[in-house]
Image: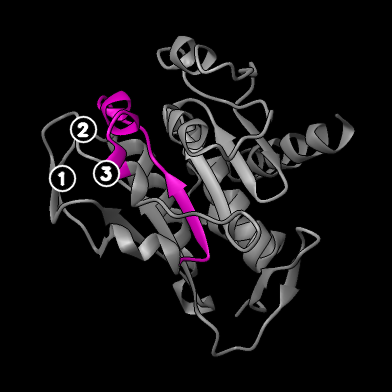
Amino acid sequence: MAEQRQVGKTGEAVPVEKESVMQVAVVTFDGFNELDSFIAAALINRCRRDGLTAFITTPTPVVTSMSGVEVTGQRPMEFVEEADAVLIGSGIKTRDVVADDRLISMLSLDPARQLIGSQCSGALVLARLGLLGGMPVCTDRTSRPFVEACDVTVLNTAFHAEGNIATAGGCLASQYLATWVITRTLGEDAARDVIDYVAPVGENRETVERALRTVRAGEYVARAM
């Protein structure tokens, strides 16, 4: 079992007691993109025995994906306040979400004590919450003009993190958000094990190294800026 860790003030993983449980809220709105929510949640939940668990977190008991898949939420939106990490997924109704003061008020997030990440159009939510503070973001091609309209710089990369906030662009970049969360909470070895397990057969090494390299590069660029 990997040594359990938690996020320290310096942004590095530090050891915690074995009985400690870290929880991740994967915020999933109506019209969500399945790849965004399910990939991140599934990868993180490979670490449940090490004390890191992800929950699909929804504003209503049932939400329907952009492809018509109905999903029952595992946690209500109030759960985001107690979660150690919060990942905000994308979807075809994100602009409706950011225009809904009631929904936005449910997202009481604190980057001083939580890891916070967004996937694709989820960057619009971070902007609406005022969490970016001039930080550039990653998003998908469709969402890019709407994010830029919020006076936010969009990078032409898949992953970018500064401190306890990270963004990813492109559906399959959800693996990088999961890698980031696992690395920051349990350490790089735990992330390596998870990505190696789910990698396509015969492509394990390159898949693992790409994921870790992308996360390292995204954080390195932030330090260099």
- In the rendered structure, which disc, 3 or 2, sits on the residue that comes first in sequence? 2
Residue sitting at 51 percent across and 31 percent down? 127
Q: Is 88 drawn above or below residue 134 in the view shown?
A: below
Residue 160 visible? The answer is yes
x and y, in percent, of residue 151 in the image: 58, 16
Q: Amino acid at mark 3?
A: Arg
Q: Which residue is mark 3?
A: 102
Residue sitting at 52 percent across and 50 percent down? 178
Q: Assess whether mark 2 and mark 1 are in contact (beta carbons under 8 angstroms).
A: yes
Dot 3: few (<14), some (14–19), or many (≥20) neighbours within 10 Å?
few
Question: Quarter of the image containing the N terminus?
Answer: bottom right
Residue sitting at 64 percent across and 88 percent down? 17
x and y, in percent, of residue 65 in the image: 19, 36
Residue sitting at 67 percent across and 79 percent down? 3
Q: Amino acid at mark 2?
A: Gly
Residue lying farthest right? 224
Q: Amino acid at mark 1?
A: Val
State left or right for residue 173 relative to residue 10.
left
Numbered label attached to residue 31? 2
Numbered label attached to residue 24? none
Asked whether 16 or 208 is in front, the reply is: 16
State left or right for residue 101 relative to residue 209.
left
Q: Which residue is mark 1?
A: 63
**What whole-number distance in Å separates the C-alpha atoms at marks 1 and 3?**
17 Å
x and y, in percent, of residue 6 in the image: 65, 71
